[in-house]
Image (cartoon, rainbow, N blue to C red):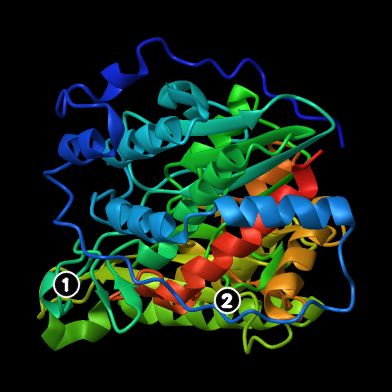
Amino acid sequence: MALDRVADPRQPAGHAAHAAHLLPALAGRAGQRRLLERHLQPDQPAQRARIPHLPRPASVPSVIGEQAETRALHALDTDACIKLAQDLVRVPSVTGNERAVQDLVALTLEEAGLEVDRFEADVSRLKAHPRFPGMEVERTEAVLVAGLLGQKGERSLILNGHVDVVPVGNRQAWHASPWSAHIQAGRLFGRGACDMKAGLAVGIGAAAALKKSGLPLRGRLIVQSVVGEEDGGIGTFAMADRGYRADAAYVLEPTRLRLIPAQAGALSFRLRISGRSAHASVRYEGVSAIEKFELVEARLRQLEHALNQQTHPLFRDYPIAYALNIGRVRSGSWSSSVPDELECEGRVGVPVGMASAEVRRQFAGALTDAAQRDRWLGEHPPQLDWYGGQFDAVEVDPDLPAFAALRAAHAQEFDVPPELVGAPYGSDMRLLVHEAETPAILYGPGDIRQAHATDEWIAVDEIVQAARVVTAAAARYLAA
């Protein structure tokens, strides 16, 4: 792997001007809070997690690595990590509307003493790129923020996190405001708390600790705060397009502090099926698009079964490693009419080791097969459109030096190595690997089962644990 290859990450002149449209007070933490006071609620004391001091594992790091970790951990402010996670949650940032929260990220990185590269990607140009990863939410802007510590050198490491979140859904189902970021019974609640503003706070906290510690680094640490992960990954794609590269990356998604070196892909699709309308009393004169959809859906279930015949070893605990799901169906316009059209949208999983193009080929083949078994479908075949996020599968070597440092730091914290598992969902990990030529793994606080959920939450203790592990790993890997 080539060394750090950041292609002129420009520091914009007058950085504070980007946030001037909100409020003029920009200096210091108090100024930052006033700048975003329309989003942030009154402070609540961060609850410090009590982490037991565990004995060292049998494999003890080198003296240099151990000293670097000690200095970095001494400089780590875990209360600040929790507080930042709360502040980030309190700024609504549903995919496509991330500017305000990115202002907060940029100011926080600036206050921590990092060089800040805040830029706005050319969305139209990126969409025209032949490898553009797709998106479901139309946007006119994409605001990206990177914080840089150290200089180009022997090693480089990216800490990647996204600020966009999914919609809250039924607001009445939440026990409190989705943007409250309140802490109750050791849990931080709010949309994006788990997925993945706490993870981003961990990355920023780790970078701040390394800066405060004064450790000499033999390379560069890059914190990436990106947008648009939820619907395709335009943010990380834009970072790669800008020239950001590194020897390795930690994507701080919620993994329950398990290390994920292999991730399935996911391809969004849309199907349109035609029928023939008729009055319900003579429905036999018509052709129900719903009934024809049932034939197609049955054949797609067979495809799902075929895709799961050979499962990667890290995915064997999942009942279905590479799921095919129909998430939305629209059909019919009147209860007394035979529906003459149906549109459905869904996603199909991409097995690790299989190209997305092969999954698309098999999917199209399944539709053709279904059409050949039914006269109507043969004459009126389903129309297929691949739209929105297109997530390739990806796998990396977990024994690369940066990942070995993370595993060692985890073992130092917990006295056991991290569990290695696969992830059956997509993320920006594949864009770092395929577009930025940067080996990447997933590791972060939180449980994916809380992501996108009503009353989304993350354990405060886990934020602290993740901050300690990531800080120690970065120090171990980068310290001179």
306 relative to 423, above or below: below
Q: Which residue is mark 2?
A: 323
Residue farthest to the top, as pictured: 13
Residue 22 visible in the shown view: yes
Residue 443 visible in the shown view: no
Q: Nearer the viewer, residue 151 or 335?
A: 151
Where residue 411 appears, x then y in whole percent? 75, 74
Circle 2 packing at 10 Å, graded few (<14), some (14-19), many (20+), is: many
Q: Nearer the viewer, residue 265 or 226?
A: 226
Q: Along the polypeptide, which appears first: circle 2 or circle 1?
A: 1
User: Seen in the image, is 403 located left or right of residue 461?
Assistant: right
Amino acid of disc 2: Ala
332 relative to 142, above or below: below
Q: Nearer the viewer, residue 93 or 302?
A: 93
Q: Residue at x 36, y 82 (%)?
A: 291
Q: Quadrant of residue 353?
A: bottom right
Q: Nearer the viewer, residue 341 or 353?
A: 353
Where residue 262 appears, x then y in whole percent? 73, 65
Q: Secondary structure at mark 2?
A: loop
Q: Quadrant of the C terminus?
A: top right
Q: Quadrant of residue 300?
A: bottom right
Q: Residue at x 68, y 24 (%)?
A: 6
Q: Quadrant of residue 345?
A: bottom left
Q: Which residue is mark 1?
A: 170
CA separation in Å, label 2 and label 1: 26 Å
Circle 1 packing at 10 Å, graded few (<14), some (14-19), many (20+), is: few
